[in-house]
Image: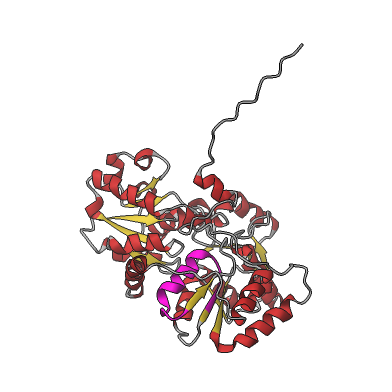
Amino acid sequence: MTTAHPVQELDVQPSPLALLLLGRDADPRSERGVECPGDLPSPSDPDLVERARAAKEKLGEKVFVLGHHYQRDEVIQFADVTGDSFKLARDAAARPEAEYIVFCGVHFMAESADILTTHDQKVVLPDLAAGCSMADMATAEQVAECWDVLTEAGVAEQVVPVSYMNSSADIKAFTGRHGGTICTSSNAKRALEWAFEQGEPSTTKVLFLPDQHLGRNTAVRDMGMTLEDCVLYNPHKPNGGLTVQQLRDAKMILWRGHCSVHGRFSVESVNDVRARIPGVNVLVHPECKHEVVAAADYVGSTEYIIKALEAAPAGSKWAIGTELNLVRRLANRFAAEDKEIVFLDKTVCFCSTMNRIDLPHLVWTLESLAEGSLVNRIEVDPETEKYAKLALERMLALP
């Protein structure tokens, strides 16, 4: 006879991060966001396009819709302007008559728009879960701990932070407080040159947040540094996984962060496309790994990629290493000019968080606003805004 033993219940509580990832908790300071309140229209509703159009027409000049290049076509069709994150934030600031700024992008972009627009304007993100995995890789607490490590190593006074636009408002504010600047993928070189001018060239260091690849590629490819001049700070290891001597010797202290889309491209992808398409031009974003950038023919920001394809001769062939929604849109746009444009990787890879903004979320947002209900407002607190804006203004002042 077998005796049944009572099952002992373990008092195990899931961590805050686990709850967040499971969608059972919320962190308002996280790029991961939370669920939207209210009921969304069904994605199979055949009237979604007409509903979006009707709500937008009802709102008139009260609403200004921004569409990032990586958005779905179904959303882009309703954008008043399209562009990269910083261009869109500036476009919003240039429209003070618009009461509502609907940002079809991700969380950090909406934060930047809120920082740069007037206090009377309300920035709205159609889905609060549209965050950014790269921005999530550097939290305010982690960066504060990193600064303590730099202080204990005796190098903090020599360090100028430079933070990529793809960072949270908290990280932008940290950058502003510590005398640093923001950069985009277009002006990263100018930002680094400015940073090294803030102290003695032989001793000044840059803490580059949060994308290691943009920092490394700019330093080595554009400014002539060596890979040995760069060290990688890992926030998940004691002291960032670095010795005091490594911190003292480094010129570039790179944060261990990356873009989940651009980080997928590999040298094998480049070699494969060259074998499949003779004469192809490989054009990649500087968020790609250093070895991919070194293997490419051209490297540049999203705006650079678009302009390069606009200027390309008819009959030319291009493999593009950036987000798939944009690559497909460009391929369709230039097909009539006999320009062959393909995605660099064989594997389909959209920006999953950017794609959270879909037509049902946009319809729900526009209809709510048209009915006088403000939803999903993104607000940066005054203290954070003050220092984040200071860092952004330093970037705007760059020659």
User: Which one is nearer the viewer's eye here, 291 or 363?
Assistant: 363
Residue 326, image quadrant: bottom right
For this view, does 181 lie left or right of residue 95?
Answer: left
Magenta stretch: give its range: 101-121
Quadrant (top left, top right, bottom left, bottom right) of the N terminus: top right
Question: Looking at the picture, how far across and down is residue 363, in whole percent?
Answer: 66, 74
User: Which one is nearer the viewer's eye here, 34 or 163?
Assistant: 34
Question: Looking at the picture, how far across and down is residue 59, in whole percent?
Answer: 60, 86
Residue 245, image quadrant: top left
Q: Residue at x 64, y 78 (%)?
A: 367
- Residue 313 shows in this picture: no
For this view, does 381 lie left or right of residue 366?
Answer: left
Q: How many marks?
A: 0
Residue 124's place in the image compared with 55, above or below, is above
In the image, residue 118 lies in the stretch drawn in magenta: yes
Coloured how?
secondary structure
In the image, residue 229 lies in the stretch drawn in magenta: no
Quadrant (top left, top right, bottom left, bottom right) of the C terminus: bottom left
Residue 333's place in the image compared with 283, above or below, is below
Q: Residue at x 39, y 60 (%)?
A: 170
* Residue furthest top in the image: 1
For this view, does 182 lie left or right of residue 294?
Answer: left
- Residue 243 shows in this picture: yes
Q: Residue at x 37, y 43 (%)?
A: 240
Question: Looking at the picture, how far across and down is residue 353, in whole percent?
Answer: 59, 60
Question: Looking at the picture, how far across and down is residue 86, in whole percent?
Answer: 46, 72
For this view, does 88 lie left or right of residue 22?
Answer: left
